[in-house]
Image: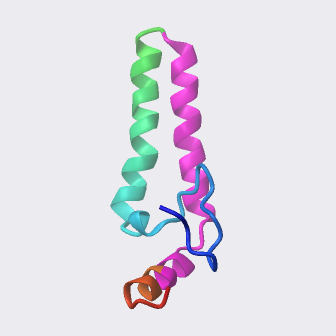
Amino acid sequence: MKAPPDRPKPKFFDLAVPFFLPIWRRVLTAIVPILWATVELANGESFWALIFFALGVTAIWKFYTADWAAVAAQAEKDARGGG
């Protein structure tokens, strides 16, 4: 599916999308990788623990810096058919 020409193309790790408007989805997306990192660390897999911890921290940062009011406004505009 091609992005409409008036909207910028989404980036690879762009988490500021309408799917994440409910807070519980953001919390789960940030906490699950960190919890999995503890499982990996408990099993002695420090490399994978670091990878999953970094994913969780990156998700927290992306969610913290996102403009959720703008995302909600764009989702409302798209729902009304405003393009």
Image position of 56 with respect to 67: above or below: above
Image height of 16 relative to 34, above or below: below
Tell me the residue at 47%/8% (across/down). 44
Q: Position of residue 76 (x, y in %)?
A: 42, 86
Report x, y in % for residue 16: 54, 64
- The picture quadrant where one finds residue 22 is bottom left
The answer to whether residue 72 is magenta is: yes
* Towards the viewer: 31 or 21: 21
What residue is rendered at 44% in x and 83% in y? 78
Q: Most extreme residue toward the top, as rendered?
A: 44
| Residue at figure coordinates x 42%, y 63% from the top left | 20
For the residue pair 59 and 16, the one nearer the viewer reads as 16
Q: Please name whichever residue, 81 or 2, is drawn nearer the observer in this view of the structure.
A: 2
Q: Main secondary structure of the magenta part?
A: helix
Q: Quadrant of residue 66?
A: bottom right
Q: In the image, is residue 41 above or below residue 1?
A: above
What count of labels does the image hold? Answer: 0
Q: Using the image as rendered, state which of residue 16 and residue 56 is in the foreground.
A: 16
Q: Residue at x 63, y 76 (%)?
A: 5
Compared to residue 16, the image places residue 40 above or below, namely: above
Residues shaded magenta: 45-74
| Protein image colouring | rainbow
User: How far from the left and from the top, in percent, is residue 40?
Assistant: 43, 18
Query: Is residue 57 a member of the stretch shown in magenta?
Result: yes
x, y (%) of residue 71? 52, 76
Answer with left or right where residue 45 lies relative to residue 61. left
